[in-house]
Each structure stands twice: as structure tokens, then as C-alpha cells.
């Protein structure tokens, strides 16, 4: 996936703004080495670096370049969640709003486990079961309505239930100490085009092979369809549901 870093930072800064609460749960301490898995443009990595040593990785070359430019004192590497590899292991692995993009979840949980020290903790949050269902249901409906049946059934994201994801972690060897699934309606920064912008940023894969005119009509139709649920007090919200997990390598 190619990321538009400036669109991400200008209009989707909420991704890392919400993530700072997760750092409180991580509770990074002096002397620790922490891996930020899927560091985006590095804002949370930088926050973690105020308390501990940290390395950031991301699958996107553009994001790694942006992180390195913004925070030259931190080490960033372009690596994937299911195949990252370091000689050293970590006291904690942290990941915010990333794991729903990962295709091979089983390999990833094992890889995370193998890169933790004994006693090391995993602190992650991402899209949980039912995440953005209002938006995605409307998008699938509209794609079908315009005759794009194949696009309508594309699956790209992983939004697991607590039981599904904690079983995966336990199979990898983790002991899960906290699991939450909660609604977190997320304010979108664009006043007029909130849902359209969100889909443009994150849902481009749904529009493969669709021309600009059809795409514009679908985006308008989707935004109109979700208005009663997603437009509140003059502002657009995405119907995010988060799964938040803390697990330990015993
Ligand atoms: C999320 O953070 O929940 C999310 C972001 C992009 C696409 C799908 C979900």
C-alpha cells in the first residue's frame, strides 16, 4: 500500500492522537528497548522515546522516510509485521492502528512472540470486530448498486473478536492479561467530505478499475447513506471499534 503522507498527517492525525492513550498502558521505562510496529510517520515512536529506547518499523517506504526526516535521532526501518527480524529482542512491542492491515496474522503473532524477552509485553490496539461496519456496508452496497460486484466483496482488513485474537496470541505462547473491545466513534477532520476523505485515504483498494466519474458518484452515495449515523452535531465521525490487548511472554 502506498501512503500519501501529507494527507495522512493533515487530515488523519487522529490515528496517532488517540494512540497516545495506549502509551500510558505501555508505560515505557528508562532502560527498556521497545519496538513500535507500524510506526507510521513516527509521532508515537517519538513520544515513547521520551521514556525508553525505541526502534520504529513500518512496511511503507514513504512513512519510514517521513519518520526519519522528522525524528533523525530515532532508528526506523522498512520491515513487515510478519517478517521483521532483529538480532536483539525487546522488552515490549507496541502497535497502534496497524494490525488490521496485516495479511498473515498467525506468522505475525509468532514473530512478535519470538522478538520479546521473557517477561516482555505486547501492547496493541487496532480495528476490532464490527469496525467501520456502517461505512463499509454502505460502500459495498453502493459498489453493487453501480454494477461493481467484484469490488463490493473485496476483503482487505482483519477486524477480529476478542476470542479470535486472544486464541491466536495464546497459540503463539502469550498469556493475555487484558482484552477490550469498545466503540470509539472517531471525529473526522473534514467538515464537508469526512466520509469521502476517509474512504479516499484508506479504502482505495475498493476502486480498482473504476473510473473517476463512477468513483465520485459512489463516494457521494455512500456519504449520503451513512449521514444519519455518522454525522452528529455538524461533524463527521467514523464508527471505529477498537480491540485493545495487553499480553505477556512468560
Ligand atoms: C482503523 O484504524 O480502524 C482503520 C483504518 C483504516 C482502514 C480500516 C480501519
Image: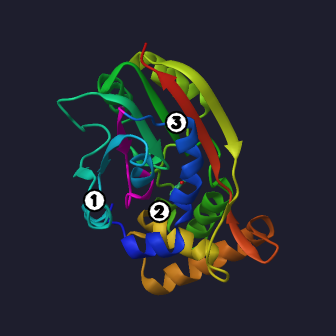
Image-based side of 2 in relation to 206, left or right = left
Give the mark nearer the N terminus: 1 vs 2: 1
Give the mark nearer the N terminus: 3 vs 2: 3
The residue that label 3 is drawn on is 27
> Which quadrant of the figure has residue 30?
top left
Task: Give the alpha-carbon distance from disc 1 to disc 2, as whole Å.
Answer: 30 Å
Percent x, y of residue 197: 55, 75
Percent x, y of residue 173: 41, 15
Image-based side of 66 in relation to 18, left or right = left
Residue at 42 percent of width and 81 percent of height:
211
- The vertical placement of 149 against 95, above or below, is below
Nearest the eye: 20 or 9: 20
**Residue extent of the magenta highlight:** 31-44
Q: Residue 151's mark? A: 2
Task: Give the alpha-carbon distance from disc 3 to disc 1, as whole Å.
Answer: 24 Å
Q: Secondary structure at mark 2?
A: helix
- Classify 10 Å Cα crowding around label 1: few (below 14), some (14-19), many (20 and above): many
Amino acid at each position: 500500500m502506498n501512503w500519501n503522507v501529507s494527507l495522512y498527517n493533515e487530515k488523519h492525525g487522529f490515528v496517532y492522537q488517540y494512540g497516545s492513550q495506549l502509551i500510558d498502558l505501555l508505560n515505557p521505562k528508562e532502560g527498556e528497548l521497545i519496538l513500535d510496529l507500524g510506526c507510521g510517520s513516527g509521532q508515537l515512536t517519538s513520544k515513547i522515546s521520551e521514556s525508553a529506547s525505541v526502534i520504529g518499523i513500518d512496511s511503507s517506504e514513504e512513512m519510514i522516510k517521513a519518520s526519519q526526516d522528522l525524528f533523525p535521532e530515532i532508528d526506523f526501518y522498512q520491515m513487515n509485521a510478519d517478517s521483521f527480524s532483529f538480532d536483539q529482542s525487546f522488552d515490549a512491542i507496541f502497535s497502534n492502528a496497524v494490525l488490521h492491515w496485516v495479511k498473515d496474522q498467525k506468522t505475525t503473532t509468532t514473530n512478535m512472540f519470538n522478538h520479546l524477552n521473557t517477561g516482555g509485553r505486547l501492547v496493541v490496539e487496532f480495528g476490532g470486530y464490527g469496525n467501520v461496519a456502517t461505512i463499509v456496508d454502505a460502500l459495498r452496497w453502493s459498489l453493487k448498486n453501480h454494477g461493481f460486484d467484484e469490488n463490493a466483496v473485496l476483503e482487505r482488513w482483519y477486524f477480529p473478536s476478542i476470542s479470535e485474537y486472544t486464541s491466536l496470541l495464546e497459540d503463539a505462547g502469550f498469556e493475555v492479561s487484558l482484552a477490550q473491545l469498545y466503540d470509539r466513534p472517531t471525529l473526522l477532520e473534514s467538515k464537508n467530505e469526512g466520509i469521502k476523505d476517509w474512504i479516499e485515504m484508506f479504502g482505495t483498494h475498493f476502486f480498482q478499475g473504476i473510473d473517476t466519474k463512477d468513483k465520485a458518484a459512489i463516494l457521494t452515495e455512500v456519504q449520503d447513506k451513512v449521514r444519519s449515523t455518522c454525522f452528529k452535531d455538524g461533524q463527521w465521525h467514523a464508527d471505529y471499534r477498537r480491540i485493545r490487548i495487553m499480553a505477556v511472554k512468560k
